[in-house]
Image (spheres, rainbow, N blue to C red):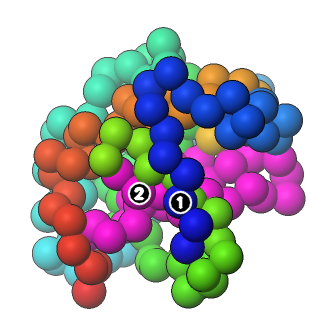
Amino acid sequence: MKFIRHRLLGLPALALLIAAAGCSSSDDSPSAAVPSPDAKVTKLCRNLDKVLPRQVDGLDRNDPEPRSPLTAGWGSPAIILRCGVPRPPEMDDPEADGVEVDGVGWLLQKRDDGSFRFTTTLRRAYVEVSIPKARTSGGMGPLTAVAQPVKKAIPEGIAD
């Protein structure tokens, strides 16, 4: 997996790439499928939920339905975090794109609708952050906001 280092000031090319993509919704009630991990991962995800920020990229927390400590959201259209997701098969691709933000590695996936999905790498639970098209111009802000909570709640290692 190729990784691009990202610092708080950002990589202009990566920011431009993200600005060029996305997904949009005007619904104020976001929804997200709740993952169903084993008990160990669920405990890690509950710990993550306790330390997540109230705001991400200047957006207030707006959790998706159904409510769960394994999901979180910010803004509308919402940036959605899901904890305890399955390992993406793209992680097996040595050519897959990745980024490191504040010490947390992320698999980067541009989706057909123009949005981006980022999934943590080398953590004991996989955490996914989906950024809709309408929010992609913010660069790495969402990942910067959740990197420290992920580091605090989800230890490094390989998820079972």
The location of residue 42, given as percent across then percent down, is 21, 67
Residue depicted at x 85% and y 59%: 112
Please name the residue that numbered disc 1 is placed on: 3
Residue depicted at x 68% and y 49%: 116
Q: Is residue 75 visible?
A: yes
The location of residue 104, given as percent across then percent down, is 35, 51
Q: In the rendered image, which quarter contains the N terminus? A: bottom right
Q: Provide the residue span drawn in magenta.
A: 104-130
Residue 155 higher or lower than 21, as above or below: below
Looking at the rendered structure, the secondary structure element under dot 1 is strand
- Looking at the image, residue 3 sits to the left or right of residue 11; the answer is left
Please name the residue that numbered disc 2 is placed on: 105
The location of residue 129, given as percent across then percent down, is 51, 49
- Looking at the image, residue 153 sits to the left or right of residue 101; the answer is left
Residue 78 lies in the magenta stretch: no
Residue 111 lies in the magenta stretch: yes
Task: Name the amino acid type tagged 2.
Answer: Gly
Foreground residue among 158 and 135 = 158
Residue 101 higher or lower than 135, as above or below: below
Q: Is residue 82 visible?
A: no
Residue depicted at x 47% and y 57%: 106
- Looking at the image, residue 59 sits to the left or right of residue 112; the answer is left
Label 1–label 2 contact, CB within 8 A: yes
Looking at the rendered structure, the secondary structure element under dot 2 is strand
Foreground residue among 64 and 118 = 118
Residue that protrudes farthest toward the top in the picture: 58
Name the N-terminal-most of marks 1 and 2.
1
Badge nearest the viewer, 1 or 2: 1
The location of residue 49, given as percent across then percent down, is 24, 44
